[in-house]
Amino acid sequence: MSFDFTKDGRTILEAQLSELKEWMNQGYEERRKNFGSKLLCYSPTAYPYKISDHKQVSPHNFVSLSVTGTSCSLRCEHCDGQLLKGMESTVTPESLFERCKQIKDKGGQGVLISGGSDSEGYVPLERFGESIQRVKSELGLEVVVHTGLVSETTAHYLAEAQIDAAMLDIIGDERVSREVYHIENGPKKMRQSLDILESLDIPTVPHVLVGLDYGRLGGELEALEMISQGSPAAVVVIALSPVRKTAMENVEPPSPEDIGKVLTIARFGMKRIPLLLGCARPMGQHKIDTDMYAIQSGTNGIALISQEGVDFARERYLQPVFLDVCCSLAYKSMNSINV
């Protein structure tokens, strides 16, 4: 059946748990039919990770780098630049390439290149274009770029470099974009950025952040519909995890059930697109419960999966496959392991 984001998506959002389970069961069966039984379990080495079933092979395998250090002019309400503190600073093209060379020399597989945005929502990537191209052509590392909004000039640099994936947060609600991200006409600009990237055959991996509206659902359904209008290589769902020293530090995050609803809508709306539960989400029991919903709703992979999630996946006859890279590379992972 065709899936109507407005009608069917709203039905799932408003579903009671018993009804949601029926939807998730259908989504799970769709996933098995279209993708088989492998569950991709990602652990990019920017985050220390160890469970009974898996330990990261090396802290250098897939590292996160920021081309602006801890600087960000956008000052989003949920982050305020705090998340950049978890990335290594490479603020010049020379330092970016040199750090990537060190990673390669230590046996690393790839890097995530990110950074803070200017006041309009663009990460200043253009002057790093040549260095990124060298990282690909000379070092052979996999390169994932968190772009923010993109201009045609930036996109051409990324296309020439042949990056492996471009990640971009997508917001479906104009008010949330304005009040939280401080970007006017955000949904339109985000869709335009995806159009620019996709027109140059750059694999796009849009992210939808559940609960961005101070923990409430608002615009996630519309964001998924926007994404479905293009040709994403994969779709990642993440969730608000309140960060200290931000306006949202005391906000109640969205429930695992609500995250499960968004994942279920994404599964039905984009049946043949790899769907991932990303690493940015609350930890502890919340994470365990969210893993369970993700598995039931038919996701293809989970970043930083809990041991409980692994055990539950096996109970559902799925086969966990562990990869110490960014989950945005799912479209490549699925080809390499014959999913």
Image (spheres, rainbow, N blue to C red):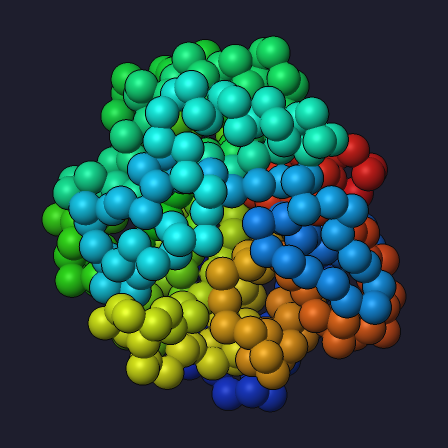
In the displayed structure image, the side of residue 36 where residue 249 appears, left or right = left
Q: Nearer the viewer, residue 172 or 247?
A: 247
Q: Nearer the viewer, residue 117 or 156?
A: 117
Q: Considering only vertical position in the picture, is 267 above or below 283? A: above
In the displayed structure image, the side of residue 298 where residue 328 appears, left or right = left
Can the viewer see residue 140?
Answer: yes
| Residue 107 lies in quadrant | top right
Residue 283: x and y, percent?
55, 74
Residue 220: x and y, percent?
37, 62
In the displayed structure image, the side of residue 18 where residue 145 appears, left or right = left
Q: Considering only vertical position in the picture, is 281 above or below 169? A: below
Q: Residue at x 64, y 77 (%)?
A: 288
Q: Residue at x 51, y 38 (%)?
A: 112
Residue 45: x and y, percent?
64, 48
| Residue 286 lies in quadrant | bottom right
Number of marks drawn: 0
Residue 76: x and y, percent?
24, 57
Quarter of the picture containing the C terminus is top right
Can the viewer see residue 33?
Answer: no
Q: Residue at x 41, y 33 (%)?
A: 90
Quarter of the picture containing the N terminus is bottom right
